[in-house]
Amino acid sequence: MIGAFVKGLSTTFKYLFRKPVTVQYPEVKRPVRERFRGRHELKRFENGMERCIGCALCAAACPADAILVVPAENDPQKPNSPGERYAARYEINMLRCIFCGYCEDACPTNAIVLEHQYELSFFERGSSIYTKDMLLIPADKGHGEIPPILQQLDRRPSPPAQIDL
């Protein structure tokens, strides 16, 4: 009994003379871990095209039903994304989102990514819905090249092999 009491007091004295750990939050932001899941971002390719192809797999994988994707056909003269479609409307309801990362895992083009930003406060319920304009990164901050499978979608299918009978 006395041994445990002395052990507890030694722990108290050990921390009594240390400098307290206090983060002055708004001025100093604490770095997060590599695996931290924060605010969503919609990424772009290096050439500025949107990575999202409007497939809505992220919305299908979301267990909280927080994502809304409305696809539209790409204009062949000025496409928004590689392939046939793009996300004309993309919304995430942050009140519903549970930051599970299933949307990130389901995306075939790595368009949606949970980044490290953790300042997500808002004063109105309407502000909790993040639109495509809020989520999409600037065109000059894209990275990566378009995968060949998405570049070949605009081509006509090759004719079937001719079989000599």
Image (cartoon, rainbow, N blue to C red):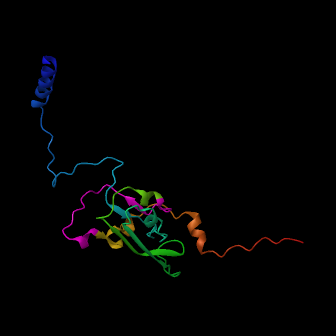
The x and y percentages for residue 61 are 45, 62
Q: Position of residue 125 (x, y in %)?
A: 23, 71
The C terminus: image quadrant: bottom right
Q: Quadrant of residue 116?
A: bottom left
Q: Is residue 110 magenta?
A: yes
Magenta highlight on residue 5 = no
Q: Residue at x 71, y 73 (%)?
A: 158
Residue at the spot 14% in from the left edge and 49% down from the top edge: 24
Give the farthest residue toward the front.
1
Compared with 36, 82 (above or below) is below
Residue at point 9% right, 30% down? 16
Q: Nearer the viewer, residue 65 or 83?
A: 65
Classified by dominant secondary structure, the portion drawn in magenta counts as loop
Q: Which residues are magenta?
A: 106-128
Taking depth in this image into account, of 144 and 110 the one nearest to the observer is 110
Visible residue check, residue 36: yes
The number of discs equals 0
Residue 17 in view in this figure: no
The image quadrant that residue 64 belongs to is: bottom left
Q: Which residue is nearer to you in this view: 155 or 40? A: 40
Which image quadrant: the N terminus?
A: top left
State which quadrant residue 50 falls in.
bottom left
